[in-house]
Amino acid sequence: MGKGISLERQALERLGKNWGKSSLTREKLLSGTKLFAGFVDKTFHLERLDNLKPGMITAYVATMKAGGLEPSTMAGRMTAVRAVCKAVGKQGICAKHNAAYGIERVRVNPQPINHDIIDKIRTELQDRAGAGDRIARMMTTAEALRQEFGLRAKESLMTKDLVEKNGKMYLVVEGSKGGKPRELEVRTEGQLKAVQLVAATSAALGSGTSRIIPPEMSLKQAYNAQRNEWRALGGTRLNNGNMHSERHGHARTMKAEGATNAQIMEELGHGECRSPAAYIPR
């Protein structure tokens, strides 16, 4: 592999097709890989991917910064850079942490929550769902899962299964970062109603997978429809009414009910290194 084969193709062939990731995550990785390979090809005229150098990565970061990209966008693209380096056996040429390249994500911690906007959106979706709107039916159920369990937007669309252990019921969360499912105990009446709504919605929409996504839609289409419709109804990050704010609300509810910070972060699916300050007011 080398001369005569584009760097983009070399990179994609090295990464392979079955990465054990969801379609949305895989799509982001594909896009980031193509961007990095295209930059290296155009800037350095490299013929073999195996000849990647640390300076090429530094130059790529400099170009992203010059283009005014947000730190979160650059961080996402660096994930693809590391995947490419690993695929060619040169993990060491790329720093493990984005901070080494001056990429720092600035977070507003904790995120304020505009309950009025969320309540308004919830009511509108319920009205539309009652009138037969299939997307609204899906979104109403996803919203209940986010509110009651603090799920991420993608998780709220993919999660469907329940398991029983030692007389307790657990929701199996799918679509988590890293691809590893986690189990959340169904503890409250609100949570029980939310999981019951999943089964009812799946049946009403004719899903063949038991998910709440209409069978005529792919996960990507459902994800985009949910995001765009929520935004169209007035829920944005700028007014603190985005879907992710419900995740913050769930964390604060758990804290008020006596849960420890470790328990909260575990339920949200975060690793030990993530600080609860992103969710819990000090």
Image (cartoon, grey):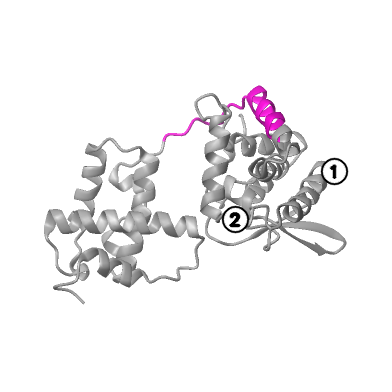
Residue 47's spot in the image, x, y percent?
Answer: 14, 68
Q: Position of residue 77 (x, y in %)?
A: 34, 50
Task: Point out the frontmost of discs 2 and 1.
Answer: 2
User: In which quarter of the view is residue 64 placed?
Assistant: top left
Q: Quadrant of residue 89?
A: bottom left
User: Residue 223 got which mark?
Assistant: none
Direction left: furthest residue = 45
Residue, disc 2: 216
Residue drawn at the location 13% of the way across and 53% of the way down: 43
Residue holding disc 1: 189
- In the foreground, 208 or 55: 208
Q: What's under tag 1, amino acid-wise?
A: Glu
Q: Earlier in the sequence, mark 2 or mark 1?
A: 1
With respect to residue 229, does 114 lie above or below?
above
For mark 1, give the secondary structure. Answer: helix
Magenta stretch, residue numbers: 106-125
Picture coordinates of residue 238, whole percent (x, y): 50, 26
